[in-house]
Amino acid sequence: MITPAEGLERLSVNQMTVRGLSLPELADGCARLGIPGVGLWREPVRAYGVKATAALLRRTGLTVTSLCRGGFLTARDAAGRARALDDNRAAIDEAAELGTDTLVLVCGGLPPGDRDLAGARQRIADALGVLVPYAVERGVRPAVEPLHPMYAADRCVVSTLGQALALAEAFPAGRVGVVVDTYHVWWDDTAPAALARAGAAGRLAAFQLADWVTPLPEGVLVGRGQLGDGSVDLRRWRERMDAAGYGGPVEVELFNGRLWARDGAQVLAETAARYRQHVL
Amino acid sequence: MITPAEGLERLSVNQMTVRGLSLPELADGCARLGIPGVGLWREPVRAYGVKATAALLRRTGLTVTSLCRGGFLTARDAAGRARALDDNRAAIDEAAELGTDTLVLVCGGLPPGDRDLAGARQRIADALGVLVPYAVERGVRPAVEPLHPMYAADRCVVSTLGQALALAEAFPAGRVGVVVDTYHVWWDDTAPAALARAGAAGRLAAFQLADWVTPLPEGVLVGRGQLGDGSVDLRRWRERMDAAGYGGPVEVELFNGRLWARDGAQVLAETAARYRQHVL
């Protein structure tokens, strides 16, 4: 195991934060800095090989805190629905292979031409009903992530922690969790109560951090701020998670074109420093 | 008065939808198409002259359905706060002069370096306490507009209709209303109930329409979709407003760089046609 640096015991860095680093470079960088956890994305993991990734991280002693992502469960047609279920079963298998029990679900937006948010949310609930037994058998707990409402049309019709929790609550707490990502929920005055409710029920599956900075870039995908650069009271959210009984990893997930243009090892070190400064 | 074209009896076009049109061109265009109402913005109105605008619209027989905008009430320092209050008093005077009782408030974002959303919302409540008596004396009702959560940091910490209503409910219904703009609330599953509550209390002061289209442009300000181009079930929202007892104007407010690049008279006619097709 990696011996965590003091203060970094709970830190995990999602590989998208330092997208330019290969998996061996990421593992090496985390080992050097005493960062004990990483969050992974399916595409780079599959490119490197799922088994090879699992072996590399085991060798380094890194914990995989989550796998992103399953989801996209809102197709209306039978073929699209079947494809999505197959892909989610594959994601569950990959999570199990990587040794993480947390598969993050980005549930999907509105199909083209569709304007029925409630209908799309119902299809997500139906798909969870199919997938959860498969996940349980493999020791994986899908975790529903609410995405910021600016993604409601094209990525995720689950826009609030309250909605995510409502979807999860159709299943026992050990089978479906929720993800709290500060970038998505920071603006929501009802999120703290939903967070406390999720914590009391044992449904807090993952905690991700990004700061909110403006102006947003075109497409609003790659403008997540480095910790401390923006409007989110990150420490307050960490304290809320603690108070709700969450003692798990704190994962930094930054999609940021400017960070990606920089040296990955440097960004990794900066992220650890910002975490100490703004989150601990 | 303008005789409204059949079906357009409630239609109002906000002047920002056809920003390239001068006020006389806008008045002329509305008269030709039988559009009985316009929503105004302070800057172009002041450039033309408030009295001159009022006289022009009276002459044409157009109703001013709202004035945008007051607000930006979140400054922490005394000087910033005093400037904001002065500016809002001026906006109230201008609304009265233009003959509209509806002044739309975009309440303001977080001051630089501030991360305290609840504190900013409290300062808005405090400022309303100062401004409302001034508005009442002039026959103007400030209307709190929730803006989409993607504007929470830099424009408006009031992100949901529920929050807007909570601010308004500190005052009698005749003194502070709320604005429902589909662009800002369409994603929110709690908005329909808040809308019904606002309607029952007589607080629905304005109804604005824009569609949600992606990808969002850089800065996310000028990407509002023409009616029917996006993900919002506009007719359903109009029916919700009707069911809540709102019988007032339906104002189309599109900030859209592509529409602005086109001929304004053509966009005006298209907007009326889209209104018939997607809203009636």
Image: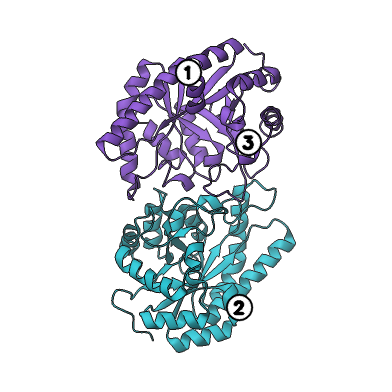
Chain colours: A purple, B cyan
Could you tell me which residue is drawn at 34 percent across and 62 percent down?
Answer: B238
From where the camera sits, is residue A176 visible? Answer: yes
Which residue is the extreme one toward the bottom? B59
**Residue B231, percent from left and from top:** 38, 52
Numbered circle sitting on residue A50 = 1
Q: Residues within 10 Å of mark 2 (few under 14, many from 20)?
A: few
Q: Secondary structure at mark 2?
A: helix
In the picture, residue A228 is in which quadrant? Answer: top right
> With respect to residue B23, does A70 lie above or below?
above
Q: From the viewer's perspective, is A87 left or right of B174?
A: left
Dot 3 crowding, Cα within 10 Å, few <14, some 14–19, many 20+: some
Pinpoint residue A277: horizontal percent, then vertical percent: 72, 32
Which residue matches tag 3? Answer: A260
- Provide the residue designation for mark 2: B46
- Could you say where residue B107 lies in the image, as x and y percent from the top left? 57, 60
Left or right side of A127 for B190 = right
Q: Is residue B49 above or below residue B127?
A: below
Q: Which sits in the foreground, B252 or B272?
A: B272
Quadrant of the frame with the N terminus of chain A: top right
Q: Which quadrant would the C terminus of chain A be assigned to in this image?
A: top right
Question: For this view, does B79 lie left or right of residue A64?
Answer: right
Q: Are marks 2 and 1 on the same chain?
A: no
Using a 10 Å C-alpha cutoff, classify the residue at mark 1 as few (fewer than 14 neighbours), some (14 to 19) or many (20 or more).
some
Residue A15 sits above or below residue A232 on the image? above
Between marks 2 and 1 in the image, the one whose residue lies nearer the viewer: 1
Identity of the amino acid at label 2? Arg
- Please tell me which residue is depicted at 50% across the width and 52% down the height of the picture: B216
Looking at numbered disc 3 in the image, what kind of residue is underneath it?
Answer: Trp
- Give the SS element for disc 3: helix
